[in-house]
Amino acid sequence: MATHSNLPLSVVKIGGNVVDKPEALTSFLHDFHQLKGRKLLVHGGGVLASKMAERLGITTKMVNGRRVTDAETLQLVTMVYAGWINKSIVAQLQQIGCNAIGLSGVDGNAIPSARRNPEPIDFGFVGDPITRKMDGELITTLLEKEIVPVFCAITHDGNGSLLNTNADTVASSLAISLSKQYRTTLYYCFEKEGVLRDVNDSESLIPLINRETFAQLREQGVIADGMIPKLDNSFSAIQEGVSEVMILHARNLLQKRGTMLIG
Amino acid sequence: MATHSNLPLSVVKIGGNVVDKPEALTSFLHDFHQLKGRKLLVHGGGVLASKMAERLGITTKMVNGRRVTDAETLQLVTMVYAGWINKSIVAQLQQIGCNAIGLSGVDGNAIPSARRNPEPIDFGFVGDPITRKMDGELITTLLEKEIVPVFCAITHDGNGSLLNTNADTVASSLAISLSKQYRTTLYYCFEKEGVLRDVNDSESLIPLINRETFAQLREQGVIADGMIPKLDNSFSAIQEGVSEVMILHARNLLQKRGTMLIG
């Protein structure tokens, strides 16, 4: 396949907290549309799936504090993420002149994935992308036609099963696989300013972290909890070819203001 | 755009009655995969949307015997058609080696549509494809990459609203718009052998109908009820460039056995 390794590509992940707020989402989508160059969007789920589950009387099964995706839950999250949320976002982007196309990982086999090992605990229809199997061909074709892919975090195992997948991981696996063809920046947009020294102080933003300072901050306990897997994931992506990762507030996408992670 | 006017294209529509039966659907998808040459699939909805509506306590509003798609119903049908049914079909096709991609009319603006006039009766978020605005560019790009588009019958108005659309009309508008580039055959697959002289006698298949014999059969009352709009729709498609239309049982797709409509 032709490479476009000098061409920049933005892989932007937007969290469920923003997807849930109509005004914040609309404002974000306008900014996303303004973003220059080749780009793609990955969106999280938001609370609609939980609300629907409640209305349908589907109870969330938990094992060791982690959610299990049984057949009924898989159907529900596929309806909500790949159906309503994905198509609503695409309709909004089309309205403002952005030629978006809504996809899941099963479409064009864009994200071949593997179901998690059911031993010792079976989490059901949950899986992880197999980055080395992602050829990026469909996505590259779309990007070169100036079509903007919008991915939900539903993938498949190639044996007929859809799989519920972590949206951060979908974004990083897309960024990694496309970094063979493009100079790729991965943006994690969420509801905080970036990585903060003090989670209660939005002024305490750490503007730049490299692998060394990450190790130090982690040792000092400054980076903890949910931020550790996000940064682990980010540094893996950088190791596998992504040029840089930005962690930032959804409203700061265009200014690129937040925490920049480099190798 | 380049034309491929000597290349055949099959536009296949599968009805909700087949979508609802897992074994019939699987068998149909195997046949569809065997179909030679460029092809795309359009699927109907089936009963899942009604079942979900019941479980969610969404009541179907009817005006003059026709269903109204309010905001809640639009969300529901988008979840079911564009989410679960579309992605399940694509996962099955991928499993058997068919590189399918699931789309709705909003994706890549494949099917620009117009909301139905709310006067005298407002049927809500319901619309019809604007065939002259369908450029077929995205679909042609996919077909020439040997990717098989699978469409649900959700479209959009370009102003941010998704629209519930008749699946037969989605299929005929796709066939018409693509007949500029391809020699197009439109297949309506359903649960009957084709157009029957006697609806209770599956042996009474009428193998060939042209515009003249259609007028006669209609006058004689042989073709009545739901079959009239289907045939009207089909002859319009032929008038607008589609080479032929087949109306046939889903199990007879490969044998092409059913009723053939020609100009």
Image (cartoon, coloured by chain):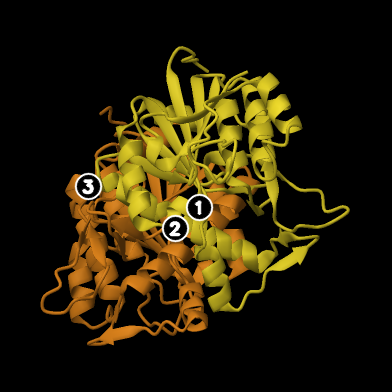
Chain colours: A yellow, B orange
- What residue is at 36 percent from the left and 48 percent from the top? A90
Q: Pointer 1 indicates a residue of which chain?
A: A
The disc at residue A20 is 2
Circle 3 residue: B241
The local secondary structure at tag 2 comes to loop
* Amino acid on which disc 3 is placed: Gly
Residue A36 placement (x, y as % from top left): 33, 26
Q: Secondary structure at mark 1?
A: helix
The residue tagged 1 is A16
Q: Is residue A181 left or right of residue B246?
A: right
Residue A104 in view, yes or no = yes
- Percent of width and height locating residue B35: 51, 47
Q: Read off the chain for label 2.
A: A
Q: Quadrant of the C terminus of chain B?
A: bottom left
Residue depicted at x 64% and y 33%: A231
Real-space Cα distance between discs 2 and 1?
A: 6 Å
